[in-house]
């Protein structure tokens, strides 16, 4: 399952989805319920990236039910975090904030810096979705103090920090942070995070009223996202282009 998630992060969606769809019934047959829950959550992440929100919801919800039945509080918090991301894509930022807050509480209890960082980043995104820039700033600042170790979590934090900076009017610092994040993701072969950083870079240029530059970035993101089936980012790029 770890290999499937790595393939997903590298942008190999078809391979990752095929592998994880094989793993789920195998885990179920072996009554390896924790593994089944983990696999369902990964499948949800892939489906969300493919912009299949309804099927992602089913996978996340089934994973959550299994984790809850096992009494795995950290697993429940992880599912809440995934569902928070889903609600953000449904434009339900308030629901996302509630789920992220619940995850923060559990990761605090579990003493998990990586988990808490992810949850605070998710809460910052939900604040941005509601136009609450000051509240988003508080969350990313607290997240940075936790010193997460996971590379993808640090990239997610950096991208979100840049989006906060842009809404504070600090476009230059936001652009610099996103270039660094995109370069780090590219060097690590993390295509998903590279495209997320580039999408945010296009957003920053549009916010800065640099329409030509922003449109060029977003068109490139849309093209590259289509190549790997990253439909969620492609749709978001198209929406930004339509609104620019």
Image (cartoon, grey):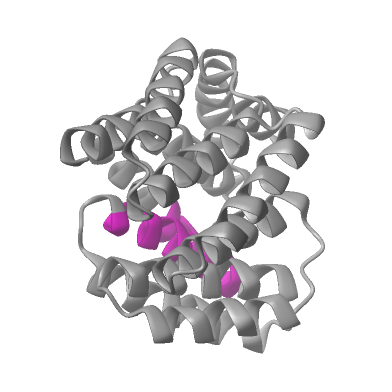
The answer to if 78 sits in the magenta stretch is yes
What is the quadrant of residue 168 in the picture? bottom left
Q: Is residue 35 left or right of residue 105?
A: right
In the displayed structure, 219 sits above or below 52; it is above
Q: Give the range drawn in magenta.
A: 63-88
The stretch drawn in magenta includes residue 142: no
Residue 223 image offset from top left, x and y in percent? 42, 15
* Residue 52 appears in the picture as rendered: no
Could you say where residue 243 lies in the image, as x and y percent from the top left? 17, 41
Image side of residue 127 versus residue 140, left or right: left
**The N terminus lies in which quarter of the figure?**
top right
The answer to whether 215 is drawn above or below residue 170 in the figure is: above
Magenta: main secondary structure equals: helix
* 38 sits left or right of 210 in the view: right
Residue at image coords 41%, 85% = 135
- The x and y percentages for residue 160 are 53, 61
Residue at the (21%, 52%) spot, across then down: 90
Point out the image quarter for the C terminus: top left
Depth check: give the residue in front, 52 or 89. 89
Taking depth in this image into account, of 8 and 211 the one nearest to the observer is 211
- The count of marks equals 0
Taking 192 as reference, is 80 above or below it? below
Q: Residue at x 26, y 39 (%)?
A: 240
- Residue 145 visible to the viewer: yes
The x, y position of residue 28, in whole percent, is: 53, 36
Q: Is residue 136 above or below residue 191?
A: below
Q: Which residue is drawn at 41% across and 26% down?
A: 216
Where, by quadrant of the figure, is residue 220 drawn? top left
């Amino acid at each position: 399952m770890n290999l499937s998630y790595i393939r997903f992060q590298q942008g190999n969606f078809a391979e990752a989805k095929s592998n994880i769809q094989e793993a789920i019934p195998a885990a179920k047959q072996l009554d390896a319920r924790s593994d089944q829950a983990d696999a369902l959550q990964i499948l949800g992440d892939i489906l969300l990236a493919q912009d299949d929100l309804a099927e992602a919801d089913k996978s996340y919800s089934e994973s959550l039910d299994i984790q809850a039945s096992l009494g795995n509080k950290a697993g429940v918090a992880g599912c809440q975090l995934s569902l928070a991301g889903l609600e953000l894509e449904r434009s339900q930022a308030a629901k996302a904030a509630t789920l992220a807050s619940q995850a923060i509480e559990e990761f605090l209890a579990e003493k998990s810096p990586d988990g808490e960082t992810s949850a605070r980043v998710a809460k910052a995104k939900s604040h941005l979705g509601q136009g609450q820039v000051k509240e988003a700033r508080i969350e990313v600042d607290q997240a940075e103090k936790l010193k997460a170790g996971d590379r993808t979590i640090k990239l997610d934090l950096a991208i979100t920090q840049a989006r906060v900076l842009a809404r504070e009017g600090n476009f230059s610092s936001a652009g610099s942070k996103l270039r660094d994040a995109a370069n780090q993701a590219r060097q690590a072969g993390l295509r998903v995070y590279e495209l997320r950083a580039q999408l945010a870079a296009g957003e920053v240029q549009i916010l800065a009223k640099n329409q030509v530059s922003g449109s060029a970035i977003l068109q490139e993101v849309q093209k590259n996202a289509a190549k790997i089936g990253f439909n969620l980012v492609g749709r978001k790029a198209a929406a930004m282009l339509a609104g620019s």
